[in-house]
């Protein structure tokens, strides 16, 4: 469905981003796998395409303006085309007592999740505006729609993306770029367990508590996120922009 689309994903060395990179590649897209962890990005790209022709791995720390600019330039140069799809996915978690949090920790969550999303999107949009099928997607979270105690700055960072998506959809709709977000609930990646370990010693119990509040009774899988991403960048969703698509197994529908 994405034949010869040029796609770029941040934070794709692991979890959701890696799953999307695999799926885009299976849909015949060309894929740039980027991550602050260069080895992880290159590892995913090589696993997807050992020949290195249709998938490349690049280091990009989304908090660094120069990294974001270089990512876009390298993607355009390697595939000799503007970017068609950019997924601003890199993110870090915060869980814990607000008053006990070190200011540097609070600052880092905002820097990666908000500033990093903004800087990478700005760099990408300079290329996306030249694509006839352009889509920008952000990885938000259920935490961008609703809040939870002891998730303060994570909630704040993901709520910021909900506003960013709307504003960018208004600004870039007239030049043909669609801007949306996907907001997953608890998704089965290393991030989830590390996130929960910050506030509980019994991670398995915390996972089963979360699942018990999900009407579908299971975690979201990274592949399900990838399904939603393919839909949101394909012509099947051509009239959708400014939207945050919840992928939460019904968790925000109400109390079980
Ligand atoms: N797993 C969940 O339950 C869940 C739920 C909702 C939203 N999310 C969001 O999904 C996204 C991906 O999370 P995941 O679960 O795949 O986690 P993950 O930890 O498996 O992957 C995140 C990747 O981002 C990279 N990264 C971190 N800081 C970066 C930076 N400054 N620049 C570039 N890359 C950076 C990490 O190296 C890692 O490879 C995040 O934005 C997260 O907030 C995750």
Image (tube, rainbow, N blue to C red):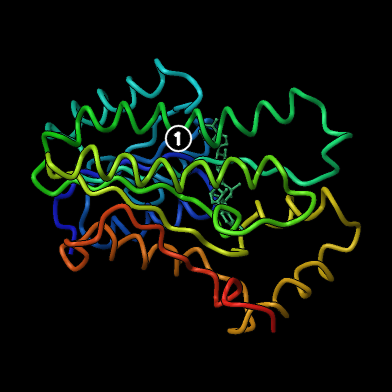
**Quadrant of the rendered image containing residue 107:** top right
Q: Specify whether 56 is left or right of 79.
A: right
The N terminus sits in image quarter = bottom left
Percent of width and height locating residue 7? 26, 45
Q: Position of residue 181 (x, y in %)?
A: 40, 53
User: Quick check: which quadrant has ligand 1?
Assistant: top right
**Foreground of the two, 156 or 231:** 156
66 shown above or below 35: above
Residue positioned 24% across, 60% down in the render: 240
User: Which residue occupies 20% across, 43% down?
Assistant: 6
Which residue lies most toward the left here? 132
Rendered position, 224 above or below 134: below
Which residue corresponds to the image point at 46% horizontal and 51% vertical from the top-left?
18
**Mark 1, residue position:** 117
Q: Position of residue 64 (x, y in %)?
A: 47, 19
Mark 1, Cα crowd under 10 Å, few <14 / some 14-19 / many 20+, is: many
- Please indicate, yes or no, whether residue 89 appears anywhere in the rendered image: yes
**Which SS class for mark 1?**
helix
Q: Is mark 1 within 8 Å of ligand 1?
A: no
Q: Position of residue 21 (x, y in %)?
A: 37, 52
Q: Quadrant of the C terminus?
A: bottom right
């Amino acid at each position: 469905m994405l034949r010869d689309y040029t796609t770029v994903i941040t934070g794709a060395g692991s979890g959701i981003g890696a799953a999307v990179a695999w799926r885009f590649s299976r849909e015949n897209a060309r894929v740039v796998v980027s991550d602050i962890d260069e080895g992880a990005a290159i590892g995913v790209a090589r696993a997807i395409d050992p020949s290195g022709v249709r998938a490349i791995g690049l280091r990009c720390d989304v908090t660094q303006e120069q990294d974001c600019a270089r990512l876009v330039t390298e993607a355009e140069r390697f595939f000799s085309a503007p970017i068609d799809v950019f997924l601003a996915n890199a993110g870090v978690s915060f869980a814990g007592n607000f008053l006990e949090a070190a200011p540097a920790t609070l600052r880092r969550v905002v820097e990666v999740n908000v500033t990093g999303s903004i800087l990478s999107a700005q760099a990408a949009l300079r290329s996306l505006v030249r694509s006839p099928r352009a889509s920008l997607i952000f990885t938000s979270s259920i935490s961008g729609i609703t809040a939870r105690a002891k998730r303060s700055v994570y909630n704040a960072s993901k709520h910021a993306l909900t506003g960013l998506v709307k504003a960018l959809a208004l600004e870039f709709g007239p030049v043909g770029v669609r801007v949306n977000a996907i907001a997953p609930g608890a998704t089965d990646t290393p991030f989830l367990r590390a996130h929960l370990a910050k506030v509980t010693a019994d991670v398995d119990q915390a996972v089963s508590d979360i699942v018990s509040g999900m009407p579908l009774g299971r975690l979201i899988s990274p592949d399900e996120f990838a399904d939603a991403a393919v839909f949101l960048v394909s012509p099947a969703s051509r009239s959708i922009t400014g939207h945050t698509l919840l992928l939460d197994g019904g968790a925000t529908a109400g109390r079980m």
